[in-house]
């Protein structure tokens, strides 16, 4: 049976991304930083270009790339205050750009002079480098878990939905996704995390050893929901902006954002849930 386009895209994604991720996980350090910087910069350029098409606002795009690298560097050296400083700087750049554009077009309520268009700079930083920088604080096995759960969620949803069909979950945003596929992806992600919990004695220190089973199940559910939400978000964004793919970096297979949209929010979700679990397990019992 010939492979569908969706199958081919998954195979190409695995062949391109998995060796790079394996290299970064094995070497860590500045190799990991370089890979995340490349992913962040490529994804940011695509994100900005979708809203600022036709080569417009190149200085703003370059400023976003620079601030994105600063955010990743701050994550690398463990300085969250520097991340906050980069976001504040982005806010001021957005505000200044809006003021200048509005003063030039004070009688024109065009979209070009709206603050919503200006805030794309800040939104892109929150969407990509802020999410990706969490990876540099994870243990190797935590990175592997997030990747496995995300890929398993996507794969489980695709094959379950293809096999069972049924009602669409959000047809206006993603016409092909079904409730059956969504539940299949949820189940697959939960199973992956439960298996990880069952083998926690093999995990590196700090990667969740000793958690009760229900925390692992909740983690799997959280990673799945965030993964699906990230996919829906990018799909809706592309439809709203009238573009088919986020970019052309991977000919015939879209851009970087098309390949990592499910992963971005999952990374931040893992960081948040891990912190919550650690807090409740370490809180004193009275």
Image (spheres, rainbow, N blue to C red):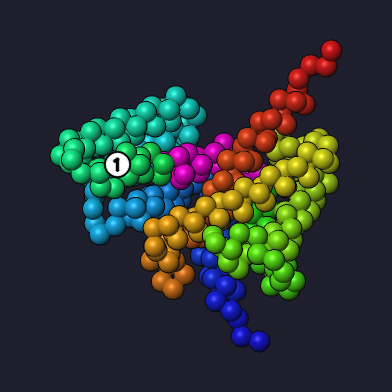
Q: Which residue lies furthest to the left in this view?
A: 104
Q: Name which residue lies at 23% across and 33% down.
A: 99
Residue 279: image location, x then y, percent: 71, 25
Report the label total: 1
Point out the residue furthest to the top here: 286
Q: Nearer the viewer, residue 126 or 279?
A: 126
> Which residue sits at x=62%, y=47%?
226
Counting from the top left corner in percent of width and height, residue 140 is at 63, 44
**Would residue 20 appear left or right of 63 to someone viewing this image?**
right
Verify whether residue 18 appears in magenta: no
Q: Residue at x 45, y 61 (%)?
A: 239
Q: For the magenta stretch, what is the residue range?
A: 125-144
Position of residue 277 relative to residue 4, above or below, is: above
Please state the horizontal and vertical placement of residue 268, each as a whole percent of the image: 58, 40
Q: In this view, does 248 lie above or below 53?
A: below
Q: Can residue 207 be seen in this view?
A: yes
Q: In which quarter of the image is residue 177?
A: bottom right
Which image quadrant for residue 201? top right
Q: Which of 193 and 87 lies nearest the eye of the viewer?
A: 87
* Res. 121 visible in picture: no
Residue 259, image x and y in percent? 51, 60
Residue under the point 54% across and 38% down: 134
Q: Quadrant of the C terminus?
A: top right
Q: In which quarter of the image is residue 83?
A: top left
Residue that label 1 marks = 114
Residue at the far front: name it.
107
Question: What secondary structure prevails in the magenta region?
Answer: helix
């Amino acid at each position: 049976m010939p492979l569908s386009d969706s199958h081919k895209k998954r195979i190409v994604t695995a062949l391109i991304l998995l060796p790079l991720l394996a290299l970064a996980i094995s070497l860590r350090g500045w190799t990991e930083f370089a890979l995340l910087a490349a992913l962040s910069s490529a994804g940011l350029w695509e994100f900005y270009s979708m809203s600022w098409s036709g080569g417009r606002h190149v200085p703003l795009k370059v400023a976003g790339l620079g601030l994105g690298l600063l955010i990743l560097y701050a994550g690398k050296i463990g300085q969250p205050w520097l991340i906050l400083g980069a976001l504040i700087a982005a806010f001021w750049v957005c505000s200044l750009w809006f003021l200048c554009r509005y003063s030039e077009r004070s009688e024109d309520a065009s979209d070009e002079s709206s603050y919503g268009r200006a805030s794309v700079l800040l939104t892109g930083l929150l969407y990509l480098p802020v999410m990706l920088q969490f990876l540099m604080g994870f243990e190797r096995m935590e990175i592997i878990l997030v990747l496995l759960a995300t890929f398993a969620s996507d794969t489980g949803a695709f094959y379950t939905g293809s096999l069972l069909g049924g009602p669409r979950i959000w047809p206006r945003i993603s016409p092909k996704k079904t409730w059956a596929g969504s539940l299949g992806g949820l189940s697959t992600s939960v199973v992956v995390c439960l298996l990880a919990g069952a083998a926690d004695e093999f995990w590196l220190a700090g990667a969740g050893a000793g958690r009760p089973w229900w925390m692992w199940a909740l983690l799997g559910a959280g990673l799945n929901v965030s993964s699906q939400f990230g996919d829906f978000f990018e799909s809706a964004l592309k439809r709203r902006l009238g573009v088919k793919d986020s970019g052309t970096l991977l000919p015939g297979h879209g851009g970087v954002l098309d390949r990592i949209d499910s992963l971005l929010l999952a990374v931040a979700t893992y960081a948040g849930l891990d912190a919550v679990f650690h807090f409740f397990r370490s809180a004193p019992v009275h």
